């Protein structure tokens, strides 16, 4: 995907800006990038799940945002694991390991993240997503036209 197309898609289709991973604190960058899209990295959510954002990355010209987190593997927080979570421009989770699938080290989680990101096709994902958005909007417009006709 070209950078100009990615930027245009973010603004016009999702009413947002492309992701950026610049900043001094991964947690605050993740919160800024995902604010209004998902509660995944909100302070209350992180506290409840005993999770910590360790790193964040913006890939595919800002159309995919990925965090690496440390999370509690049980309710007593006696064991911790590492995993990555990837999001699209709408805040939809694209990939996340279950707690049972967490890695023992951050490095393992990051290696798995890069392998997954290398295999992920952002163009195909957004083609499907945009087509779905068009279909839903077309149906909504059709319903409004029917309703307007009924008012006449």
Image (cartoon, rainbow, N blue to C red):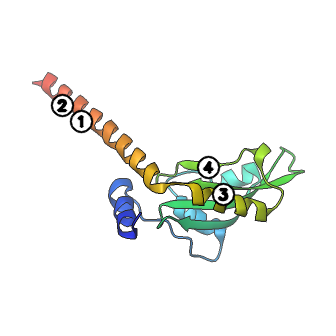
Alpha carbon separation for disc pair 1 and 3: 38 Å
Image quadrant containing the C terminus: top left
Label 1, secondary structure: give it: helix
Alpha carbon separation for disc pair 2 and 1: 6 Å
Label 4, secondary structure: give it: strand
Q: Which is nearer the N-term, disc 4 or disc 1? A: 4
Alpha carbon separation for disc pair 2 and 3: 43 Å
Read off the residue under disc 3: 43
Read off the residue under disc 2: 145
Alpha carbon separation for disc pair 4 and 1: 32 Å
Q: Nearer the viewer, mark 2 or mark 4?
A: 4
Which residue is pictured at 61% across the width and 49% down the height?
Answer: 95
Using the rendered image of the protein, determine whether residue 42 is visible from the camera's viewpoint: no
Which residue is pictured at 82% across the width and 47% down the height?
Answer: 73
Read off the residue under disc 1: 141
Q: Are marks 2 and 3 in contact (CB under 8 Å)?
A: no
Q: Nearer the viewer, mark 4 or mark 1?
A: 4
Residue 136 position within the rendered picture, expressed as x and y whole percent measured from the top left:
34, 37
Alpha carbon separation for disc pair 4 and 3: 21 Å
Q: Are marks 2 and 1 in contact (CB under 8 Å)?
A: yes
Read off the residue under disc 4: 95
Image quadrant containing the N terminus: bottom left
């Amino acid at each position: 995907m070209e950078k100009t197309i990615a930027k245009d898609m973010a603004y016009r289709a999702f009413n947002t800006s492309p992701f950026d991973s610049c900043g001094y604190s991964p947690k605050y960058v993740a919160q800024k990038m995902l604010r209004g899209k998902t509660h995944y990295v909100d302070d209350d959510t992180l506290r409840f799940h005993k999770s910590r954002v360790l790193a964040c990355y913006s890939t595919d010209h800002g159309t995919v945002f990925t965090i690496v987190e440390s999370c509690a593997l049980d309710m007593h927080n006696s064991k911790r694991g590492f995993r990555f979570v990837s999001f699209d421009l709408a805040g939809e989770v694209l990939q996340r390991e279950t707690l049972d699938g967490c890695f023992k080290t951050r490095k393992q989680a990051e290696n798995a993240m890069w392998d997954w990101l290398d295999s992920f096709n952002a163009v195909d994902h957004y083609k499907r997503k945009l087509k779905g958005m068009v279909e839903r909007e077309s149906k909504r417009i059709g319903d409004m036209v029917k309703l307007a006709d009924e008012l006449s």
